[in-house]
Amino acid sequence: MQVISSIQAIKQSIKALIKENRSTIGFVPTMGALHEGHLSLVRQAKKENDTVVVSIFVNPLQFGKHEDFTRYPRTFGNDCNLLSQEGVDIVFNPSATEMYPDGFCTSVIPESLEDKLCGKSRPGHFRGVAVAVLKFFNLIQPDIAYFGQKDFQQTVVIKRTVSDLNVGVTIKVLPTIRDQHGLALSSRNAYLSETEKTDALCLYTALTRAKTLANMGTTDTGEILREMEKIITRCTSATIDYIAIVNPETLETVPKVQNGDVVALAVRMGKTRLIDNVTLILMIAFSCLIL
Ligand code: PAF
C-alpha cells in the first residue's frame, strides 16, 4: 500500500495507473479514525474497482470556529493498518497546507442545500466539504466514490455538486453501519461517556418509531415528529438540534410523508453532536410495487 502526502506524488501515481490501463479507480474520502462504517465503503470499493484510493484528511474548512477540529480523533497508524489489511492500494493524506496553500480562496457554494438541517447550526460546513471532495475528485479522478448514508445531507450536497458541475464520477451511497444496539457508527462516538452512549440509543429508537408510524399509515409529519421528540426528550443527556422529515433531493421539509422521504436528526448528547437518519418506505407504496 502506497502512502502519499503530496499533491505532486498523487498526480503522478494516478497518471501512472491510467497509463497502465488499471481500468477503474474507486475512492473513499475519510477524515480517518476509521471504523466499520468506513471499512464497509472500502470493501465495496474493492469489489467494484481495480484500484482503491482512500483519503485521510481532517479538513479544516468544514469545521466551525468553536467545533472540534483540534480534538477530532487522529489515529493514522491504526487507520493505515486497517486499510492495508483491506488491500487498499493508495492512502492519500495531505497536510492542510498542501490542500490549501497560501492564497487559496476558492469556494463551492451548494446554495439551496447548505443552510438546511445541519447547515443551520454549522454555517460554512458544506462549502468546506464540497471544496475538499471536489479537489480530491480532480486529483484522484475516481470512477466511483463511496459515501455513507449516515451523513445524509453531505451525500445530497455531493450528488448535487457533481451533477451541477458535470464531474465524471459516480456517487454511491451505502447503508449506515450500526452497533448491535442500533447506534450509528461515527468517529465522534469516541467522545461519548458510557452513559451518553447508552442514552444515545434514543436516536435510533425515535427513528425506528417514525418508520413504524409511517408504515402503519401515518402521513402527518407533525404527528411523527411529536412522537420522536417525546422519545428523545425523555433522555436526560439529549438536547435536540433538529428533527425533520425532508425530500431526499431538495431537503425541503414535507407536510405529508411520501415514499422515499428521509427523517433526519441531530441531537447533542452532552457536548457531542450526533446525526442519524432513516428513509421512509411506505408499506402502501411497497405493496403497490409488488402488485
Ligand atoms: O464524511 C467525511 O468524513 C468528510 O466530510 C469528507 C467527505 C471526507 C470530506 O472531508
Image: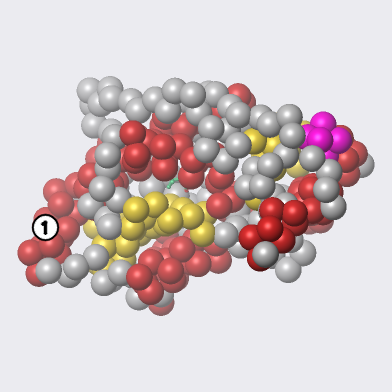
User: Whole-percent x and y of residue 208?
Assistant: 79, 54
Q: Residue 18 is drawn in which quadrant?
A: bottom left
Asked which secondary structure carries label 1, the reply is: helix
Q: Residue sitting at 42 percent across and 42 percent down?
A: 159
Residue placed under numbered mark 1 in the picture: 15
Amino acid marked by disc 1? Lys
Q: Residue sitting at 78 percent across and 35 percent down?
A: 221
Q: Residue sitting at 46 percent across and 32 percent down?
A: 126
Q: Quadrant of the C terminus?
A: bottom right
Q: Is residue 171 left or right of residue 104?
A: right
Ligand 1 neighbours mark 1 (CB distance < 8 Å): no
User: Whole-percent x and y of residue 10?
Assistant: 19, 54
Q: Quadrant of the N terminus?
A: bottom left
238 or 144: nearer the viewer: 144
- The boundaries of the magenta stretch are 220-224
**Relative to 45, residue 64 above or below:** above
Q: How would you rate the neighbour count of disc 1 (Cα within 10 Å): few for under 14, some for 14-19, many for 20 or more?
A: some
User: Whole-percent x and y of residue 217?
Assistant: 83, 48
